Structure formats: structure tokens, C-alpha cells
Amino acid sequence: PAPSMRQPRPRLRLGCAAVAAAVSVGLGLCGRLLCTSWRGAAQQSGAFVAAQLLAAHWKPLVARQHRTSRPPFFVAMASGPAVAMEAFAARNFVEKGQKPSGKAFIEFDTVEFAARVNVFYEERLAAGEDPLKPGYAPFCKHLFVPNFVPGLQDTVLLITDANAALLKSEYAARTEKELPVLGRWFPKDAVREHIVEARFLDVILYSREQIIEENKAMGEPDDGVRAPWGIVSVKPQGVDTEIPMEPITMMRNALGVELGGSGVPMVREEYTKSVEFWNKHGRVQ
């Protein structure tokens, strides 16, 4: 046919679609940063790193997808990332320029963290695997990611005769609006020589619908984020499977969203398994 009637080569169409979608993802991340980031300017460098991470994974993933009948994952992500960092989990990340203290123990930028989680999530999807593992309720999922945070230590320790006396307990609430409940843990400084670097991160996700429902019940404003899944907790650990939820957390969840729970009724069998595990282990914090 005449040059003007030749059809575009499929490889070029694929490349253009991937590039356009990648740009859309980058703009979506930056837009979310500017509109909703609670850390402000300190995270803008994280957004740049996030865009670099996505770009770094673009070429191999597009090449891999080109060998299959599935479209590149960037096309699926064109409307934005699948996973977003929630303020409830962000409180566990150390502010730039600060030292770890209290609940803040993860020394890593929140924007870059969410970007890396999204890259892992999309890589697993591209490989034909569902990376989301079932949680304690339909709205809860686990994403087990190889630990990429330097120096982040495991937060679970076996209780022995030698360290049992080091356990602390206190009635505490995770936020000002929650009902305080009794917790038990090992102070990190007291057991530092006995803990090792975490091999995996249990990234706990809640559906957007559940997050909106709980925020509304607690009187929190809508932040406008609409990623399908939100990171509500990050647990550094030694295995890529779920560690039983602590008994007191099960109890708090059963109290309802108005008191800081999720409204999921307690299941006796699951509670018994949890007690069995946490009678022999303690959380490190």
C-alpha cells in the first residue's frame, strides 16, 4: 500500500501507550503529593524518587508484557497507583531529620515506600500472580514484600526465662480518639542484641471503602485519596506469611469503628490461635 495507508507497527503503538501511561502515573503521584501529602515539601524529593522507580521498571516490564497477550501494567495504572500510604501508617515513619522515637521507627520516605510497594505489586500481577493475601476480613489484605528498608529490625521476639522480666505493659491508645487497651511489649533498647534485621515487610492494606467508613466514624475529614487500597500498617518480620493478630487488637476491632476498631466480630478459634502464639512471643517496639 501507499506510505500514507500503511498501518502503524504494533511495537510502536505499545511503546506510545506505555509512555503515555507512565507519564500519567508520574503526574498522578505528584498531584497526590501536592494536594494531600501531610509531610509537605519534605516529601517532594520522595515523589521524584518514586517517578524514577517507576521509570526504572518500565522497560523490562513492557518487554516482558510484549511477549504475552496482556497489556503493559502501566496502562492498568494510568488512573493512578493501586496502593497509597495512609496517615495511620505514616505515623510509624520517622520524620526527615528526626530520630526514631515512640511509634515512629521506620526510617524511610513515605512516598518512596509507597512507590516501591506499588512496583512490587505490579510486578507480581505482570507475572500472573495475585499478590494480595487474605486478611482477617474481606476488606483487609496482606502484601508480603522483601524488606528493602536498611537496618529495619524484626518486631517479634520469642519470650524466654532470660528476657521475660524485660516485658513492659501499659494501657495505651494508638490515636487520641481510640479507646486505650492493655498492651505488652519488649522495649527495643532492652533487647537490641537479641533482634535481627527483618527479612520481609507485612504491608497491611484496607480497602478504600473501609478506610472512608472508619475515618467518617472517627470524625476524620476525607483526604480525597482514591487509590483502591491504603497502607494502614507495616510489620517487619522474619517470614512471608501472616503472624497472628494480637489478642488485644482482635478485642479492639470487635468494639466497633467508633472506638477505634473495625467492627469485625471476634472469632473464637482465631482468638485461641492468637493467644497460643503471643503467650510465647512479645512485640518489640
Image: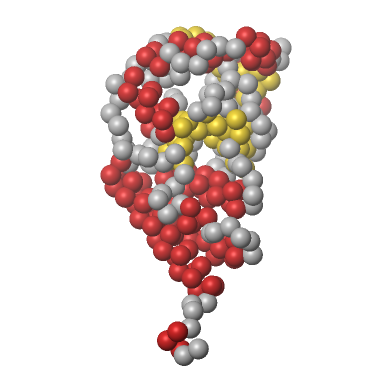
Q: Quadrant of residue 199?
A: top right
Quadrant assignment, res 196: top right
> Which quadrant holds residue 24?
bottom left
Query: Which of 21 and 280 lies nearest the eye of the viewer?
Result: 21
Residue in front for this viewpoint, 81 or 42: 81
Instruction: Identify the residue at image location x=48%, y=77%.
Output: 8
Residue at 32% from the left image edge and 23% from the top image edge: 216
Choose between 229 and 35: the one closer to the eye: 229
- Picture coordinates of residue 224, whole percent (x, y): 31, 38
Q: How is the image coloured?
A: secondary structure
Q: In the rendered image, is residue 121 in sight?
A: yes
Residue drawn at the location 57% of the way across and 23% of the way down: 136
13 shown above or below 64: below
Pick whichever, 228 or 49, lies toward us: 228
Q: Position of residue 222 (x, y in %)?
A: 30, 32
Q: Position of residue 139 (x, y in %)?
A: 50, 28
Q: Residue furthest right?
A: 161
- Residue at the location (36% across, 51% down)? 28
Left or right: 139 in relation to 162: left
Q: Is residue 46 left or right of residue 14?
A: left
Residue 268: image location, x then y, percent:
62, 9
Q: Is residue 165 visible?
A: no
